[in-house]
């Protein structure tokens, strides 16, 4: 949720942010009204409580003959206090709903608009060309006995797959490389739960417009996570953190699940858009002042991975309407996929400022002052989809695939993935 003080004192800033995202600014007025009603209800309740406490002392000190009448008055006052408390509860629920409709305040410089209104910040690397007909990642994966979509569909349905043989080894190698890089940069490795409670999923901002993309287990009332960001954000829920030594950085390794609602007919071939995949997610808790620099740091780690894996890529500054509810700014890193002749998103990193922390009640105490929300950031350092770009970029005419040098130590020194007869 956004800062209520910002909403009260600078509502036009919030309106501009909503408009940049393509949302109605009427949500800001609704939140202002709900916030005013909530504060009024709280004031009335506190006034009545004070009267009740004072009147209680009067009753206790009154002569015996006066007490029956005073007790009746006390009961009437008690009923009024209970009614006022009920109004506070109702007003707080209304305000929470109204505030929940306002997405994070877009950072300065983020382009307005939707999915196609991004700004390309840079293109890095040489787009690969071949003197032979290029194969797509699925054809290569089948020749290498690395990807088995047919049996994945047989066992689990569409958008499922098996990674077999060198395919399984390649993903584990990729994840281990990413984990090593995260450890070098001071991240604490985590194996995280992949089912979370509703308050954690809602707190991270994933139960808004895109809640239909999240799997829900009705009997347990738990959600399957689509990214380790969710359990890592919930890890310090309802806590006051000590950030004096510096930011808290975690690297969460998990299987992730997405229903891919609304993607009917898109990327049905191969493993670009699937229901289940593995991912190593970086997650950082820091101060709001340090968050922009931390964001650039996460992006630099992602770019280093791309460069060392020999992938041509570009970095885009995502437009406001494509940020998702929690992010104030998001950079996407898109790798060139030769057979599609375009860049495809492999990873992203988001600065969520204090939006998630306010919803999950995660705070710190700056210089001994009163507690204030932390900032949270996230970014993916490796995921299954990277295999798509790796296979297509490093393919050779006979269907073999060159292993990037940086991955070879994680594959027992293997230099080339050879087709299986």
Image (cartoon, rainbow, N blue to C red):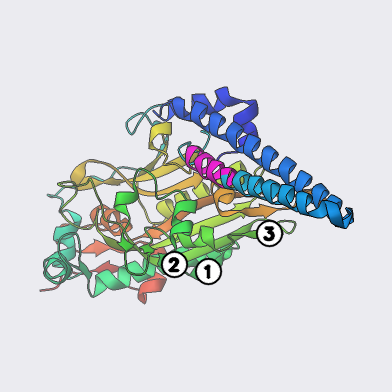
Q: Residue furthest front?
A: 65
Helix, strand or loop for disc 1: strand
Reply yes or no: does residue 149 show up in magenta.
Answer: no
In this view, the mark in front (1 or 3):
3
Helix, strand or loop for disc 2: strand
* Left or right relative to 262: residue 317: right
Q: Is residue 388 visible?
A: yes
Question: Around disc 2, counting alpha carbons within 10 Å, would you say few (fewer than 14), some (14 to 19), or many (20 or more)?
Answer: many
* Left or right relative to 375: residue 230: left
- Residue stretch rendered in magenta on the structure: 87-99
Which residue carries the number 3 mark? 241
Residue at 44% in and 67% down: 253
Magenta region, main secondary structure: helix
* Left or right relative to 10: residue 231: left
Helix, strand or loop for disc 3: strand
Residue 207 locus on image (x, y percent): 39, 50
Q: Earlier in the sequence, mark 2 or mark 3?
A: 3
* Mark 1 vs 2: CB contact within 8 A: yes
Residue 375 locus on image (x, y percent): 60, 48
Q: Is residue 138 above or below residue 330?
A: below
Which residue carries the number 1 mark? 189
Which residue carries the number 2 mark? 253
All told, the count of numbered labels is 3
Location of the N terminus (image quadrant): top right
Question: What is the spatial separation of the Cα atoms under label 1 and label 3, in whole angstroms?
Answer: 19 Å
């Amino acid at each position: 949720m956004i800062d209520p003080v910002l909403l009260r004192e600078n509502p036009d800033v919030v309106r501009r942010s909503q408009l940049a995202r393509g949302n109605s600014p009427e949500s800001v007025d609704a939140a202002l009204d709900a916030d005013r009603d909530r504060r009024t209800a709280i004031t009335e309740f506190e006034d009545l409580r004070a009267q009740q406490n004072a009147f209680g002392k009067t009753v206790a000190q009154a002569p015996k003959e006066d007490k029956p009448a005073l007790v009746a008055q006390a009961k009437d006052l008690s009923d009024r206090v209970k009614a006022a408390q009920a109004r506070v509860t109702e007003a707080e629920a209304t305000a929470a709903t109204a505030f929940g409709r306002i997405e994070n305040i877009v950072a300065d410089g983020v382009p307005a608009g939707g999915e196609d209104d991004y700004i390309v910040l840079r293109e890095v690397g040489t787009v690969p060309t071949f003197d032979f007909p290029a194969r797509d990642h699925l054809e290569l994966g089948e020749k290498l006995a690395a990807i088995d979509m047919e049996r994945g569909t047989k066992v689990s349905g569409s958008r499922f797959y098996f990674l077999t043989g060198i395919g399984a080894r390649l993903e584990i190698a990729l994840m281990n490389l990413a984990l090593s890089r995260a450890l070098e940069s001071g991240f604490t490795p985590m194996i995280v739960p992949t089912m979370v409670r509703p308050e954690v999923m809602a707190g991270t901002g994933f139960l808004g417009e895109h809640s239909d993309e999240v799997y829900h287990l009705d009997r347990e009332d738990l959600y399957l996570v689509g990214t380790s960001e969710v359990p890592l954000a919930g890890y310090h829920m309802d806590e006051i953190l000590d950030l004096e030594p510096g930011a808290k950085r975690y690297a969460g390794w998990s299987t992730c699940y997405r229903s891919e609602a609304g993607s009917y007919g898109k990327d049905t071939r191969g493993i670009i858009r699937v229901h289940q995949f593995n991912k190593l997610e970086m997650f950082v808790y820091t101060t709001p002042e340090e968050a922009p620099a931390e964001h650039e740091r996460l992006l630099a780690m992602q770019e280093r991975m791309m460069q060392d894996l020999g992938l041509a890529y570009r970095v885009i500054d995502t437009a406001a309407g494509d940020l998702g509810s929690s992010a104030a700014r998001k950079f996407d890193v898109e790798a060139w996929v030769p057979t599609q002749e375009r860049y495809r998103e492999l990873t992203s990193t988001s600065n969520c400022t204090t939006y998630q922390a306010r919803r999950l009640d995660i705070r710190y105490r700056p210089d001994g002052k009163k507690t204030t929300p932390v900032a949270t950031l996230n970014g993916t350092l490796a995921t299954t989809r990277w295999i798509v770009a790796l296979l297509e970029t490093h393919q050779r005419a006979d269907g073999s695939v060159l292993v990037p040098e940086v991955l070879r130590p994680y594959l027992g020194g293997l230099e080339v993935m050879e087709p299986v007869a």
